[in-house]
Amino acid sequence: QVQLQESGPGLVKPSQTLSLTCSVSGGSISSAAYYWTWIRQYPGKGLEWIGYMFHSGSAYYNPSLKSRVTISVDTSKNQFSLKLTSVTVADTAVYYCARDFGGNSGEFDPWGQGTLVTVSS
Amino acid sequence: QSALTQPASVSGSPGQSITFSCTGTSSDVGTYDLVSWYQQHPGKAPRLIIYEVKKRPSGVSIRFSGSKSGNTASLTISGLQTEDEADYYCCSYTGSSSVVFGGGTKLTVL
């Protein structure tokens, strides 16, 4: 059974780059037509899709974040990563990684447990 | 892309049936049968309960069902139980390899 686990700094200063990694266990990140996804949730509020990437390199991003986001896949480590540049306090959220099992369809299962990232000086 | 529209809260009593709405546009819900629903308990990650409008993943109770009409998708929970109290989010593919979530509905079981 595939499991995902986020890791990375819980505190980032404004204007810096947020970097998170998602480790995939129980299956290969290169298998099948899955898209590896980042989603965030503002404190007490709804979910926002950040973007997803296929292991071979095709990546798609939320238009509202596209200029600041990069998602990459490291097949040798069975991990994928998120970089969000020029962060502000508005980027404070719980960040989840997930697998889009429908292949670029918005159907996410499983999810990681989430990691809170606070942007503050 | 605008978020899908969900009521902020709904409530029901144990044993009742309750339906959540999720309204999008002809660019997302109205065009694609790629609507999914997620259940989220406090402090937990969301859990997929419906995908492709009405399909249930293995292990999800048959009390959960989904449907769609026009630009509005719906999630129905029958035989409401106390453990169903949670936040529920809808999600739709929007074309151009993009995805949008709803704002979420808080379910209170009275």
Image: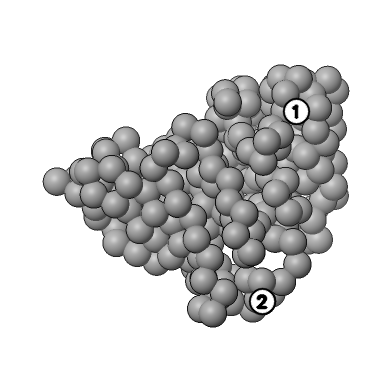
Q: Which chain carries label 1?
A: B
Q: Mark 2 lies on which chain?
A: A
Q: Classify 10 Å Cα crowding around label 1: few (below 14), some (14-19), many (20 and above).
A: many
For the point 51% across and 78% down, the residue is A77
Residue B66 shows up from this direction? no
For the point 79% across and 56% down, the residue is B57
Residue most toward the front?
A57
Residue A111 in percent (x, y) is at 58, 59
- Check disc 1 and give the amino acid type: Val
Q: What element carries label 1?
A: loop
- Check disc 2 and give the amino acid type: Gly
For the point 62% across and 22% down, the residue is B5
Vertical relation: B1 (above or below) B84: above
For the point 34% across and 41% down, the residue is A91
Vertical relation: B3 (above or below) A107: above
Residue most toward the left?
A121
- Depth check, front residue: B100 or A77: A77
Residue A109 in percent (x, y) is at 67, 57
Dividing the picture into quadrants, the one containing residue B73 is: top right
Tell me how many marks there are: 2
- Depth check, front residue: B99 or B38: B99
Q: Classify 10 Å Cα crowding around label 2: few (below 14), some (14-19), many (20 and above).
A: few
- Depth check, front residue: A79 or B78: A79
Determine which residue is flagged by label 2: A27
Dividing the picture into quadrants, the one containing residue B85 is: top right
Residues flagged by tags 1 and 2 on a common chain: no
Quadrant including the N terminus of chain B: top right
Residue B107 in percent (x, y) is at 61, 34
Residue A73 shows up from this direction? yes
The answer for how far apart the CA atoms under marks 1 and 2 are is: 31 Å
Determine which residue is flagged by label 1: B29
Q: Is mark 2 on a helix, strand or loop?
A: loop
